[in-house]
Image (spheres, grey):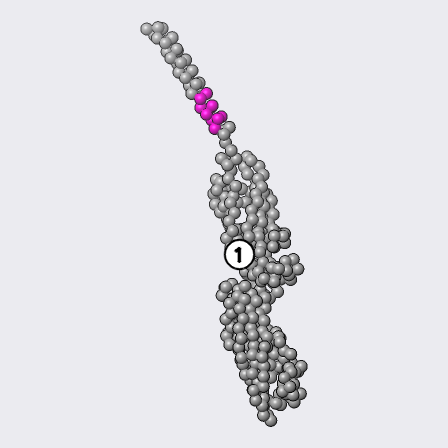
């Protein structure tokens, strides 16, 4: 019995092996066909860059510093080493600043990171390179990032990304005397009224409760001139009038004669100061100290 069944068993086993070879051949064919159809996107997806915000970190009347934040997302299940990166800030469509950011060395797998770019400039640079931007009170910038990534199996892969944003170029407000007159005088005193104009040349609002004006004679303070609280929108101006009473002993006969003849005396000056805030920028502005009022003639 056993001798008769053995050949049959061998034949069945042989047939089974043949079928397995066909199945393996079919599987290998499918695998090879799939591999042949694989593209770069099947094994690697380029990180995405997203502009988050630009925040002014410090400001005075001659320079400005800020931080621009970019979010970088890596959807790949593996980290991406950064072998090289070029970061530039362009001003009005022209190269301007090159930023050093060697701290970005790896983009973690399946996650995102925020890249904070610190920069700064003085307004004179904008005036010399982009006079039209300085004139209109704001400048167009763009951040341009070109990293080179070491992608597993694929090797170096280069990317290029950019985003534009606009920043104000702060300018000092202007205070000028546009009207003055002697209201009355006596042998001992003189009463005067002044009309002032305050202009906000900026593209953002200005406000302040501590705008002060001082009348001086040859550098010595004679009296303070009252001023209202300041609240100006962008590119807006306002007028106000204030009166003072002065001792003839303080102003002197020469000054008095000049005022009576409707000519502003050389010996008198007016200075202004102020602590300002901008609700548009959401920050205090630098204090202004001892600036001459315009329009004194």
- Foreground pick, 116 / 261: 261
Q: Residues within 10 Å of mark 1 (few under 14, many from 20)?
A: some
Location of residue 265 (image quadrant): bottom right
Q: Residue at x 57, y 67 (%)?
A: 201
Q: Is residue 213 above or below residue 150?
A: below
Q: Quadrant of the N terminus?
A: top left
The answer to whether residue 220 is visible is no
Q: Residue at x 53, y 73 (%)?
A: 238
The answer to whether residue 212 is visible is yes
Could you tell me residue 200's position as x and y percent?
Answer: 55, 68
Q: Which residue is mark 1?
A: 54
Q: Is residue 200 above or below residue 69?
A: below
- Foreground pick, 142 / 241: 241
Main SS class of the magenta portion in the image? helix
Q: Quadrant of the C terminus?
A: bottom right
Residue 31 counted in the magenta span: yes
Q: Is residue 208 above or below residue 36?
A: below
Could you tell me residue 180's position as x and y percent?
Answer: 58, 81
Q: Residue at x 49, y 47 (%)?
A: 112
Could you tell me residue 77's position as x and y percent?
Answer: 48, 40
Q: Residue at x 50, y 39 (%)?
A: 45
What element does badge 1 sit on?
A: strand
Location of residue 170 (image quadrant): bottom right
Magenta stretch in the rendered image = 25-34
Q: Specify whether 49 is left or right of 253.
A: left
Could you tell me residue 26's position as x and y percent?
Answer: 44, 22
């Amino acid at each position: 019995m056993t001798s008769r069944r053995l050949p049959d068993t061998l034949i069945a086993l042989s047939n089974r092996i043949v079928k397995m070879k066909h199945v393996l051949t079919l599987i290998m064919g499918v695998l090879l066909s799939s591999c042949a159809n694989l593209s770069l996107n099947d094994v690697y997806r380029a990180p995405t860059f997203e502009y988050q915000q630009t925040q002014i970190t410090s400001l005075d009347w001659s320079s400005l510093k800020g931080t621009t934040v970019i979010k970088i997302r890596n959807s790949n299940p593996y980290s991406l080493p950064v072998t090289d990166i070029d970061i530039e800030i362009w001003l009005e469509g022209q190269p301007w600043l090159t930023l050093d950011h060697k701290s970005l060395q790896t983009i973690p797998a399946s996650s995102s990171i925020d890249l904070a770019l610190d920069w700064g400039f003085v307004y004179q640079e904008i005036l010399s390179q982009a006079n039209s931007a300085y004139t209109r009170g704001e400048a167009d910038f763009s951040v341009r990032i070109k990293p080179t990534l070491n992608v597993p199996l694929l090797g170096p892969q280069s990317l290029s990304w950019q985003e534009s944003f606009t920043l104000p170029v702060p300018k000092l407000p202007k205070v000028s005397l546009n009207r003055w007159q002697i209201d009355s005088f006596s042998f001992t005193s003189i009463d005067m009224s002044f009309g002032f104009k305050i202009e906000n040349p900026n593209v953002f609002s200005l406000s302040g409760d501590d705008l002060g004006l001082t009348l001086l004679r040859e550098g010595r303070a004679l009296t303070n001139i009252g001023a209202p609280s300041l609240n100006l929108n962008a590119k807006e101006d306002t007028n106000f009038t204030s009166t003072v009473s002065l001792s003839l002993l303080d102003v002197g006969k020469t000054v008095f004669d000049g005022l009576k003849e409707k000519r502003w005396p050389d010996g008198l000056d007016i200075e202004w100061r102020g602590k300002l805030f901008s609700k548009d920028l959401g920050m205090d502005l630098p204090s202004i100290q001892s600036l001459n009022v315009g329009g004194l003639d």
